């Protein structure tokens, strides 16, 4: 992939590029907790966006997407939300400009194998890769956390998804064979080894693209904020759902919209689950860890309502199989992948089972990715 991107770049722009590899992410547990100041447990993976990039001495940015052969660009004097994938690049440039960092024109080729709309954060990979590339080329000296925050703000302002910090954080902080427990309130984080030689992390792609996802995502976020407002009226110490528990929530239940109650109940339980899951992880107790993943799925499906029949079906298949420790919908939801912890020697049989049953039910063969945990964004080959 790197060689291809480089070759394409030389062909198009006639010079030697800087190479930046920017991974997608998984999340073991802790979904929709990041924007509620809770915990998440993500990791960067072996699926990546590759940038081949160089400054061009002009005021113009040229970008070529290897996945569809589209060549497009924008002037640094006219950076505003624009339809299409270029929006993600423009969002990053805009954030840098907003913060007073000089951006100069660049040429780039973007290649990669992070499936789009599959819940693996291809957008954070595009954002994180560009901010790291520009940091290197322009010498800004940004920290990895600054870069993540810039990517997150770019996502808020250009595509308009009011996302939390998890995806951009994971993309930029990943470490091989380690998951990261991130406290989204103070942004402190701890690495935990996740190397179980007899287990694989298997992603099953429902092939449902979450087209409604951004508006529904923003709506979930608003519902959580509404819950916080009601809680705060009685309990001023509650700044976010991180500060609440079920007892407090139940005490204000009659003042809460039913949907808002369900959303908050899910988030409160999920924040607690991540902390418990980390204890199980340190004990090497994957069975108990996996049970929590199933609980998360139930919460996401019934209370947070971000699943869909296809994802519920995939998880119900997982539950039938003794080789699976746990499974659940991963990421924002409404489509994309489930994450499954599967016995390594049973992965082939499991994959065949899933693909056959899913095709019988929905007439489409789901892609299955056996993934590994890798480093975050890397600048240079
Ligand atoms: C998307 C967002 C993240 C996070 C997840 C759900 O991936 O970008 O910030 O909220 O959904 O956990």
Image (tube, rainbow, N blue to C red):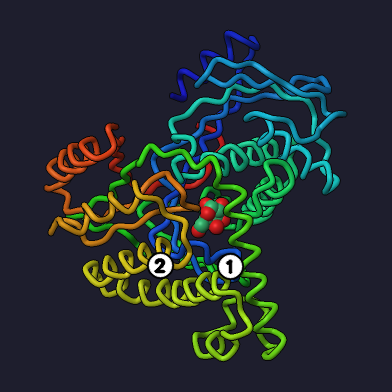
Horizontal and vertical percent for residue 153?
Answer: 71, 51
Dot placed on the residue nearer the N-terminal end, 1 or 2: 1
Look at discs 1 and 2 and give the one toward the viewer.
2
Front one among 358 and 21 = 358
Going by the image, does 91 lie left or right of 293? right
Residue 52's place in the image compared with 8, above or below, is below
Q: Counting other residues with Cα less than 10 Å from the Cα at mark 2, is it few (<14), some (14-19), or many (20 or more)? A: many
Determine the residue positioned at 34% across, 62% down: 193
- CA gap, disc 1 to disc 2? 20 Å
Going by the image, does 29 lie left or right of 158? left
* Image quarter of the N terminus: top left
Name the image quarter holding residue 102: top right
Q: Name the mark on residue 184.
A: 1
Residue 252's place in the image compared with 192, above or below, is below
Q: Evaluate whether residue 375 shows in this view.
A: no
Name the image quarter holding residue 319: bottom left
Secondary structure beneath dot 2 equals helix
Secondary structure beneath dot 1 equals loop
Total numbered badges shown on the rendered structure = 2
Residue where numbered disc 2 is placed: 299
């Amino acid at each position: 992939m790197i060689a291809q991107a480089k070759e394409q770049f030389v062909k198009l722009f006639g010079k030697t590029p800087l190479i930046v590899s920017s991974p997608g992410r998984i999340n073991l547990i802790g979904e929709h907790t990041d924007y509620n100041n809770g915990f998440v447990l993500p990791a960067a993976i072996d699926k990546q966006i590759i940038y081949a990039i160089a400054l061009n001495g002009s005021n113009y940015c040229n970008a070529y997407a290897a996945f569809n052969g589209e060549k497009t660009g924008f002037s640094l004097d006219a950076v505003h939300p624009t339809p299409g994938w270029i929006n993600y690049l423009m969002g990053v440039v805009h954030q840098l400009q907003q913060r007073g960092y000089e951006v100069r024109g660049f040429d780039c080729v973007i290649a990669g194998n992070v499936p789009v709309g599959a819940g693996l954060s291809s957008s954070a990979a595009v954002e994180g890769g560009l901010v790291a590339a520009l940091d290197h080329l322009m010498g800004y000296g940004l920290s990895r956390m600054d870069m993540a925050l810039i990517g997150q703000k770019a996502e808020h302002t250009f595509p308009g998804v009011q996302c939390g910090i998890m995806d951009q954080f994971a993309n930029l902080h990943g470490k091989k064979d380690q998951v990261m427990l991130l406290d989204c309130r103070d942004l402190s984080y701890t690495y935990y080894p996740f190397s179980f030689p007899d287990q694989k992390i298997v992603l099953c792609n429902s092939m449902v693209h979450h087209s409604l996802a951004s508006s529904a995502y923003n709506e979930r976020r608003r519902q959580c904020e509404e819950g916080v407002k009601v809680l705060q009226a009685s309990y001023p110490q509650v700044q976010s759902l991180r500060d609440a528990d079920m007892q407090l929530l139940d005490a204000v239940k009659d003042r809460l919209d039913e949907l808002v109650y369900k959303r908050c109940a899910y988030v409160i339980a999920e924040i607690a689950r991540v902390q418990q899951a980390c204890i199980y992880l340190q004990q090497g107790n994957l069975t108990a860890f996996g049970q929590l993943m199933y609980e998360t799925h139930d919460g996401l499906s019934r209370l947070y309502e971000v699943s869909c029949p296809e994802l519920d079906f995939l998880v119900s298949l997982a539950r039938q199989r003794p080789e699976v420790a746990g499974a659940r919908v991963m990421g924002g939801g409404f489509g994309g992948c489930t994450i499954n912890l599967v016995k390594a020697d049973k992965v082939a049989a499991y994959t065949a089972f899933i693909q056959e049953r899913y095709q019988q039910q929905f007439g489409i063969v789901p892609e299955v990715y056996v993934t590994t945990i890798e480093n975050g964004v890397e600048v240079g080959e």
